Amino acid sequence: MRFPNLLRTALRLAALAPLLSLHLPAQQVPPQLQPPANEQLLLQLHAKGDQIYTCKEGATAFLWELKAPDAQLFDKDGKPFGKHFAGPTWQSNDGSRVTGKAVANVPSPDANSIAWLLLNVVSHDGTGILSRATSIQRLNTKGGKAPATGCDTTHAGQETRSSYTADYLFYAPK
């Protein structure tokens, strides 16, 4: 009988599936986005919101310029953690807040999404969980890009929002 052998094989594979998925490589983070070697992961958050763009006149053409992010932050369990806004700034519900400055970026593997970033924390407020953060990665972005069209003399000064999600990983000294 071949059926019991097939069933036994299927059950073995089903039992191994969770173990196999743990060893599949995640999306590789490019070397230029790695935090300093003397830092370790402090916190991982998921953001869901918008990138806000303003139509501005550039040197040779009109273009959508990033004004600010406007996103809610969620912890690994999906619980509200805080918000992400202009600065760029991340604020925890415990009152701690950090502002970052981008030091490296690479295009997202998804051509329709904003770049992945490495940021250095340049200021801290409060004594909560974010007070120890020194570096931040923005990874796994979906969406958020400025529109390709629609910015011209008749739209100068207008704002538009582009929805996005991303993962933010916060690092602190070891």
Image (cartoon, grey):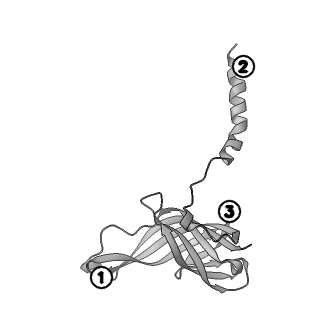
Looking at the image, do the residues carrying marks 1 and 3 touch, with CB atoms under 8 Å apart?
no
Question: Label 1, on which residue?
Answer: 57
Quick one: label 1 or label 2, which is nearer the N terminus?
2
Badge 1, how many Cα within 10 Å: few under 14, some, many 20+? some
Amino acid of disc 1? Glu
Which quadrant of the structure image shows residue 135? bottom right
Which quadrant of the structure image shows residue 94? bottom right
Q: Residue at x 43, y 72 (%)?
A: 161
Which quadrant of the structure image shows residue 11? top right
Which label belongs to residue 110? none
Amino acid of disc 2? Pro
Q: Residue at x 58, y 71 (%)?
A: 72
Quick one: label 2 or label 3, which is nearer the N terminus?
2
Badge 2, how many Cα within 10 Å: few under 14, some, many 20+? few
Q: CA distance from mark 1 to mark 2?
A: 71 Å
Amino acid of disc 3? Lys
The secondary element bearing badge 1 is classed as strand
Q: Residue at x 33, y 67 (%)?
A: 148
Quadrant containing the N terminus in the rendered view: top right
- Residue 94 appears in the rendering: no
Question: Residue 58 appears at what percent x and percent y?
Answer: 30, 81
Instruction: Establish if 132 lies above or below 165.
Output: below
Badge 3, how many Cα within 10 Å: few under 14, some, many 20+? few
Q: CA distance from mark 1 to mark 3?
A: 41 Å
Question: Label 2, on which residue?
Answer: 4
- Residue 80 appears in the rendering: yes
Quick one: label 1 or label 3, which is nearer the N terminus?
1
Question: Label 3, on which residue?
Answer: 76
Nearer to the camera, 89 or 78: 89
Looking at the image, do the residues carrying marks 1 and 2 touch, with CB atoms under 8 Å apart?
no
